[in-house]
Image (spheres, rainbow, N blue to C red):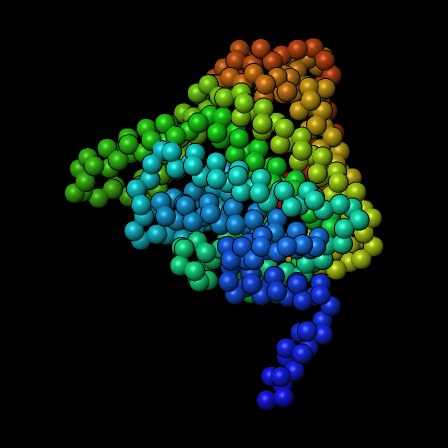
Amino acid sequence: MIRFLLIPLIFLSLPAAARAQAEITDRLRDEGLQPTEAYLAGLEAPDATERFALGAVRFLRGIEKTLQTRWLLGMNAARTELPVLRLPVPANPDPQPFTGDAIDALVVDLIADLDAARAPLLTIGDEDAVSLPVSLDALWFDINLNGTRDDGEGLMNVAGRALTGRGMGGDTGAQVVFDTADAAWLAAYTHFLSAFGEIVLAFDPAGQIARVVEASREMDALAADTPYQNAMDMQFGQQVDRIAMIYFALQQQPDAAHTMAAREHLLQMIAQNRVFWARVAAETDDRGEWVPNDMQSQALGLRVPEGTGARWQAVLDDAEALLNGEKLIPFWRLRSGAGLNLKRMFEDPVPVDLAEWIHGIGLMRYAEEGPRVAPDSWLDFERLMRGQSLLYVVFLN
């Protein structure tokens, strides 16, 4: 009896910040993302840690909603390499009919959720003290909308490969202590995913998705009482459908308002990345680091080589120069004193015709004389990452 009475007394004796951290992590584990977001949004005077938590939970809640939509529609696109859409979802035994405008609606909602997540993150300054220990095993997505955590719904089940380069299931024991620098990292990531969303909306894939879905249904209806020749034909057909949807959508005239919005998000991503690395460089602790500096270790055991920050920022410098039209993209048909202006490609977009782009005739409107971006920074980064550069691009954004 005395033991049970001591538990609330011990809790009340903790500092206010520690009690707030425990409240947040317990809610995430026991209730999930949506109730925790409501709790954090209702705080009258949230401190920096609580504002970070609100931004992070809104970010994860946005991802959760895309998973829920895909589950409802039976849309498992895990074989694609598209951000967010590549995350696996369990099979739905009774999915709703899939329509062409589902992707547009999913992306519009995701961009709105990312905007909402970014808002509290941008209120966190260099002098704010953020400290939020989170066990990644406690985080989960309510994919099937039943309000409880089921097998396969843990964060590491869904996103373990994206976070660490390897699939992860079950308890990992991984705990990350998110800090002030991580607010800028997450803000940068919201801009990255928003840029992807704006590109999707620019090409308005709804009509082409509907066209492919309808054609596939008609093909499936023919000789429906007989089996496929083999299972590979059916699986390969589904993959071809995904490729066809993207291919046909890219051949449409893109909306310049969306492509210019995508460019602005990418520039803001780079700006927030610089804030992040400046804050990381000033850190002297080594406690559950998400992205460490050269004197720290990474909480999940991911190898982050010495010099990663400097090499990655050099890559981002080149990316910013391309986005601003200060340097040009090399093209195989152009001499070393000329290239393609990426800024103009965002401002004056054209349909993506692969034959015309490979030949160059479809890109001449962007060709001009000027300095080209050199591959040195990217090659240095690749050498440092020892063949895992694409994993680190996703991780570092």
Q: Residue at x 75, y 60 (%)?
A: 287
Measuring from the top left, give residue 121's x and y in whole percent.
66, 45
Q: Residue at x 63, y 77 (%)?
A: 8
Q: Quadrant of the N terminus?
A: bottom right
State the residue at coordinates (38%, 44%): 75
Residue 38: quadrant of the picture: bottom right
Residue occupying the far bottom of the picture: 1
Q: Can you say which quadrant of the picture contains the C terminus?
A: top right
347 lies left or right of 144: right
The x and y percentages for residue 224 are: 19, 40
Q: Position of residue 110 (x, y in %)?
A: 50, 40
- Residue 376 picture location, percent across and down: 74, 29
Residue 300 against residue 373 in the figure, above or below:
below
Residue 262 seen from this side: yes
At a point 58% along the width and 21% down the height, the residue shown is 346
Q: Relative to 48, say whether 174 is above or below.
A: below
